[in-house]
Amino acid sequence: MRQSQLFTRTKKDAPKDEVSKNAQLLIRAGFINKEMAGVYSFLPLGLRTLNKVIQVIREEMNAVGGQELSLTALQDKSLWEKTDRWDDAKVDVWFKTALKNGTEVGLGWSHEEPLTRLMQQQISSYRDLPVLVYQFQTKFRNETRAKSGIMRTREFIMKDLYSFSRTKEEHEKVYASVRSAYIRVFDRVGLGKTTYPAFASGGAFSKYSEEFQTVSDAGEDIIYIDEASGHALNSEVLNDEVLADLGLKRENLVEKKSIEVGNIFSLGTKFSEPLGLTFKDEEGKLQPVIMGCYGIGPARVMGTIAEILSDENGLVWPESVAPFRVHLISLNTDEKADEIYTALTTAGIEVLYDDRDMSAGEKFAESDLLGMPYRVVVGKRSLASGKAEVKKRTEDESQEMAFDDLVSFFKK
């Protein structure tokens, strides 16, 4: 893409009321726009990154047998009353409205109920199980105080996967496979080294759940890490007496602030029993389906990357989620830069081409702010040497590379 055709512009300063690092950088770089507190629009560069995060998640969910669907945001009041989750006294994050005929409806903040009802039409026999389905759906949560930029918002896309199994043992196998998929997701988006599966309270569903927590000073949570084993736990279970069950010793634990980037729950029959989701076992007896729930917020992942991988100059995107792999900069050498742009894009390499009439200093500063993995500079010296300057965003030093070698270098 030619940068001269990109309608968004970078800013020197972020809005004064925006305190989170991720939102400051993403707004300045033109990735997002703040509509109101806790509500952000994704602009072209930001949407490219968000979609790449989504694609990584999609690939890993498909790899463990997940089937993608899309449920509705509008929710049926009577369905949620069956599980006692409609009353604001029980769930205080609802956005509710009414149809013109007076029927009260809600905007979905989660989707266990509608998906359980849907599966009543699909599951009848033990032969129909297990099933894993997931979606990328816009959720609405009436947070009392939205903060932390795109890491905590009132309207956001959530990847929620739900599993349906015959037995507890089968559920545990499915749970383990999705857990492994989550680890691969965070590895692929550049957060693997600082993200820990942390034991947390399972609430009404099970004794424990697991949260995937990324260590960061910007985090809202406190976790305790056993750095030798790589295990961690949330502060809410620190004083739990089954601590030994988790294989952790209190004296080995290190306290860290962290950002929750995902969570996985064993739901048991919490939803299948009140909503009548059953199957006939091999003996013809009706049994309740065992369920699990697995969530990741793609925008929260994107915001976390912006928080922990950025530097004093701007964003630093891993190649897996960068809006473009290469930022090509022309310094008054448009004819040669045009040739390189055509060669790279023809080879399938994603390039943002800065073909604007600006100073070198302005272009370099913007390039650092935008955070593409590689910068390729073509200037007058390049024309004489036949070489471009190639610099990796995470490295200080650049290297000279022959024009003819650029395609093969980036094709590796």
Image (cartoon, rainbow, N blue to C red):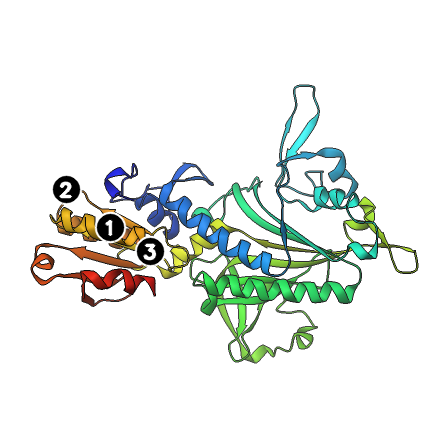
In the figure, 56 relative to 92: above or below? Answer: below
Task: Please name the amino acid that badge 1 sits on.
Answer: Tyr
> Is residue 240 found left or right of 220 in the rendered image?
right
**What residue would you read off at disc 3?**
325
Label 1 or label 3, whichever comes before in sequence order:
3
> Is residue 228 found left or right of 80 in the rendered image?
left
Q: Position of residue 361 (x, y in %)?
A: 15, 51
Label 3 or label 2, whichever comes before in sequence order:
3
In the figure, 230 relative to 48: above or below? Answer: below
Q: Where, by quadrant of the figure, is residue 371 drawn?
A: bottom left
**Other residues around mark 2 within 10 Å, as few (<14) / some (14–19) / many (≥20):** few
Circle number at residue 341: 1
Task: Please name the amino acid that badge 2 sits on.
Answer: Asp
Does the CB distance between marks 2 and 1 fall below 8 Å? no
Kindly report the distance in space between the C-alpha atoms of the residues bearing marks 1 and 3.
12 Å
Q: Position of residue 167 (x, y in %)?
A: 80, 62
Q: Residue at x 7, y 59 (%)?
A: 384
Q: Position of residue 325 (x, y in %)?
A: 33, 56
In the figure, 84 relative to 104: above or below? Answer: below
**What residue would you read off at disc 2?**
357
Q: Residue at x 28, y 65 (%)?
A: 409
- Nearest to the observer: residue 251 or residue 197: 197
Position of the N terminus, as image quadrant, is: top left
Q: Residue at x 55, y 59 (%)?
A: 60
> Is residue 412 found left or right of 176 in the rendered image?
left
Secondary element type, mark 2: loop
Position of the C terminus, as image quadrant, is: bottom left
- Nearest to the observer: residue 315 or residue 233: 315
Secondary element type, mark 3: loop
Secondary element type, mark 1: helix
Residue 295 visible to an observer of this rendering: yes
Residue 208 visible to an observer of this rendering: no
